[in-house]
Structure formats: structure tokens, C-alpha cells
Image: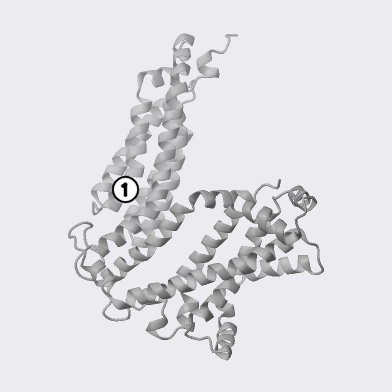
Amino acid sequence: MSRPSIATMWYVPAEVHAIRLWVPAAALMNLLIALGEGLRGGHQAIQLILLGVLGLVLIRVLLPDGTQAWKSFASRLLAGILLLLGAFSLYTSQLSMYDLWSRSWLIVPSALALIWLSKSDVTLWASGRMDNSRAEEGLARNRSKVPRLETVGLHVMLLHATAVVIIPVIWILDVAVSPGNVLGGPIGDAFTFEHFAEVLGGESFWMWTRNSLIVACGTTLAALALAIPTAYAFSRYDFAGRKESMFLFMLIQMFPGIIILVPYFMVMKTLGLLNTSIGLMIVYSVTALPLSVWMLKGFFDTVPRALEEAAVLDGCNQFEVFIRIILPLSLPAVALTALFSFLAAWNEFLLALVFNTSNEMYTLPVGLASMIPATGQQWGDFAAASIIVSIPVVILFVLFQRALIQGLSAGAVKG
């Protein structure tokens, strides 16, 4: 009985290893593309894509394992058929950017599988005739080639995930810099700043911005003033109803905001706070309180009690312990809570729409919505205003990036 060789026991070409990983990912992506074609009504395209998915699955099943040469031939034959199928599907499409991208998920994997499986080293290994010396050389190459191929595959998937976010931004930026107020058309066919000038030159936009800044900043300060001592009390003190109160905070977060819309409206009307910034601050602070308390409590739980005990031994009272010890250590969590509270108030639309009925008290989300009525939609102005409104949010995330990361990870591990 012959002793198993290195080629059959340990060696797999880097190209075959990459195909094993990439082909299932390509099949999954083609299934998603088939769902998109279903929304577009492309029945013929769906059939071709599903045939391609079946072919990719067969390629994965029939990939050579280093012992049977026929698997290599069958895989190459299937890859060639899929390559022709992808080319035919592209030929029968409208040759738009979407069609080129979607068909590439069948054409590119098939072409790579055909090219890689046809390499001399791969065919030699697949036939089971590779000797130990060549297998050792292949193992040495795999040390550098396999990580590179895995990195390429990972970056391709990350680029597609990023494209889901970037493409809408590019589209709305194109609408903002295109003449007129129409949607669609080729990207980059014209360029103008007239929409930005119209928005920035109007009095309403600056009025809406002022209202949003007042409401968002006021909400952030009020939410922190309420959440910080509340979270600290829940973290450090054991009092009657503590667990029930925390459960109530969590329960409130489960209900959609529209459920409390009518009660809030009645309260604001009774207090005479409709159409005022103070009314929105109160409502936003109350709605932001449960999440803020949970976030801050999770961080306060990680601060060792020994630090407080040492401060008490040094002569500090409980308030001084909190101000001098706990609060400085909790700045990342406080910054994260403040950022979330600010963004929630900055982007909120429904409550601001219901409680504010005059243009003078509109916040930015409500003001921007007023730019697209049932008739005469100002899409270009709306797109330009949307980009301008997003700039402060981007700046805040850039400035608080480090605090954001620290705050998100701080409550995950107890000290």
C-alpha cells in the first residue's frame, strides 16, 4: 500500500482555495440580483441568473480534490458554459451600469474559475500526478498567495457593502448640482451651484436651521442633565422599585413613537407649548431618556467602586466623588450619549410636524419636507438642502470618532 503524498494530504492550490470561497459568495449575490430582477419584471433575466446559480453550485461541488482528474475537466466545462451564459445574458440586457454590474457576478467568477483551473500546476494536482517536491513549492507559494486572494475577496465584498451607502449619496449629489428640479438622467451630464445658492440665499432655510440647533442643543443638555444622575443612581444604589423601573425604561423603548403622539399632543396643548421650541425639547428629552439611562448605566457599572471608596477615605463626599472621579472617567460615554441625543433631535420629523404648525417654527426635517409638495416639487433645492443639513452630522462624527468608539465598547466589559 503506497504512502499518501504531501500533494494529496496537505496541498491545495491557492486558486482552488479561492474558488471554494468565492463561488458560494457569487451564487448568493446572484440570488439577490434575481430578486432585484423580479422587482424590475425581468423574467428572462431571472431564468438566466438562476441557471447561473445552479452552475456555480455545481462548480463548487465538482471542484477537484487532487485525486480525480475528471472533476477538473467537469469544472472547467461548467465554467466555460457559465461564461457563455453570462455573456448572452449581458448581450440581451439594456447594457446599463446596473446590468454590467449584475452580469459581472456571473461572468467574472466563471472566467476566473476557467483560467485558474486551466493552470498547469492546478491540472497536475487535480490529476493526482503531482510529486512531493512540486507540492512543497506550492505550499510555499500558498503562504503569500492565499492571504492575498482572501484579502481581495474581502475587499470586493466590503466595496459592495460601501456602495449601498455611497451610491444614494452620489445620486442625490448629482441631483443637487444638476440644472432644473427633475430626477433621473445621466450622472454628471451638467453642473451648477444654483440650487445651493437658492437654499443658502433663502431666509427660511436659516430660520429652520436656527430652530433645529436650539431644539437639538437644548434636548442634548436636558437629556444629559436627567440621564446622568438617573443612570448613576441605578448603577450604585439599591432602592425599592429599582428593577421594575429599569424594566419600564426598556419596555418604553419597545413601543413606536407614534403610540404616544396623541397623549403628548394633549399635554403640550394643555400646557400651551404647541408651536414652541421648549415643547419639542421636553418631548425629545423624555423620549431620549430611556436609551440614555441604559447606555450610561452600562458604563457606570464598569467603573470600579474601589475608586469611590478611596475618594471617600480622602475626605470627599458623595457629590464630590461623582464630580471629580466618576464623571471625568465617564466622558466617552457622556459624549456618545450626547451625540445620539443631538442626532435624534436633529433628525426627528413626526413630532416636529405635529407640534409645529407655522413655517417660523419648523425644524429642518419638516422644512425640507415642505419643499416637496404634491405639485411643483423642488427636487434640486431639496437635494442641495439635504446635503447641507448632513454636513454638521458628518463633522460631529469625525470630531467625536474616538469618543464614539470608546463609548460603544466601554460598557461591554465590566471592570
The residue located at (40%, 61%) in the rendering is 392
Q: Is residue 297 above or below residue 72?
A: below
Residue 60 visible at all: yes
Image quadrant holding the N terminus, namely top right
Q: Is residue 327 above or below residue 259?
A: above
Nearer to the camera, 288 or 38: 288
Nearer to the camera, 74 or 321: 321
394 sits left or right of 98 in the view: right
19 sits left or right of 221 in the view: left
Q: Is residue 348 above or below residue 304?
A: below
Question: Farthest front residue?
Answer: 315
Q: Secondary structure at mark 1?
A: helix
Task: Measuring from the top left, give residue 188's x and y in whole percent.
Answer: 21, 56
Determine crowd level at label 1: few under 14, some 14-19, many 20+ residues with C-alpha closer than 10 A. Answer: some
Q: Amino acid at mark 1?
A: Trp
Residue 50 visible at all: no
Task: State how the image is colored.
Answer: one colour
On the image, which quarter does residue 110 sit in? Answer: top left
What residue is shown with label 1?
101
The residue located at (34%, 58%) in the rendering is 169
Task: Measuring from the top left, give residue 397's x and y in whole percent.
Answer: 46, 55
Image quadrant holding the C terminus, namely top right
Task: Measuring from the top left, give residue 358's x and y in whole percent.
Answer: 40, 86
On the image, which quarter does residue 3 sit in? Answer: top right
The residue located at (20%, 67%) in the rendering is 194
The residue located at (73%, 69%) in the rendering is 245
Task: Measuring from the top left, give residue 207's x and y in whole percent.
Answer: 36, 77
363 sits left or right of 376 in the view: right
Q: Is residue 101 above or below residue 382?
A: above
